[in-house]
Amino acid sequence: MPDSHLREEPTDSQLLFEGKFLVARRDTVRLPDGHSATREYVVHPGAVVVVPLLDDGRVVLERQFRYPIGHVMTEFPAGKLDAGEDPFVCGQRELLEETGYRAREWAHAGAMHLAVAYSTEIIHVYFARGLELGARQLDHGEFLDVITATTEELLAWCRDGTVTDAKTLTCALWLQNVQSGAWSLDWKPLDGAGGA
């Protein structure tokens, strides 16, 4: 087995908390040297983040209050997966609900793990272009502002600490490399983008 000298194997698992959105667990694991340790972690359903590109080169962002840290954050549109939901379908839904935009073309960029030491959360990264603006469909109790920025403005905000959201910082790296030509995307029209 590859990396067997690094792997930890679960020997017991205990449910600590089960909420509407998150689950917390405490597992006992056998370490590679045979000793035991505990691992506490959050089980997350997964999520999607979308980098929406306007025809003039600007990107669509959101400003939203995030209660756990008590700040309004500047972020790319994102949202959690519903049970069994395809990430591409989630990306389309979240973009429309939060910003009012629909996209004609989509590209799957990759995935990222946000907090590998204490969460199972994985975020699927999509780019969207050929945007058409319609009406937002915010969830009940959801309040956010939609803004636009040039790539240069976004990168300046990442550099000066205005943007500290991890998924947005990662997407800014993707954006910079895609726009420079260093990284390529496989763009697909919406009707052929299933699982893009």
Image: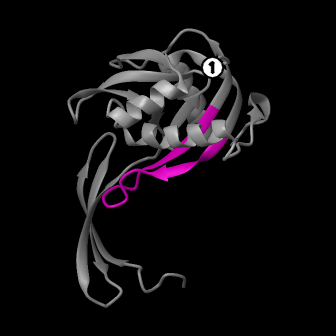
Residue at x 35% of width, y 54% of height: 115
Residue at x 43% of width, y 40% of height: 169
Q: Is residue 130 above or below residue 175?
A: above
How does the figure colour the protein chain or chains? one colour
Return the residue at label 1.
Answer: 54
Count the labels in the image: 1
Residue stretch in magenta:
108-127
Q: In which quadrant is the N terminus drawn? A: bottom right
Percent across and percent down for residue 101 are 59, 17
Magenta highlight on residue 114: yes
Q: Is residue 142 above or below residue 165?
A: above
Q: Residues within 10 Å of mark 1 (few under 14, many from 20)?
A: some
Residue at x 48% of width, y 20% of height: 98
Percent across and percent down for residue 71 are 24, 28
Task: Give the side of residue 69 with respect to residue 21, left or right.
Answer: left
Q: Is residue 10 above or below residue 174?
A: below
Residue at x 38% of width, y 79% of height: 9
Task: Give the side of residue 126 with respect to residue 13, left or right.
Answer: right
Magenta highlight on residue 129: no
Regarding residue 86, the answer to whether it shows in the image is no
State the residue in front, 161 or 15: 161
Percent across and percent down for residue 153 are 47, 24
Task: Give the side of residue 132 with respect to residue 163, left or right.
Answer: right
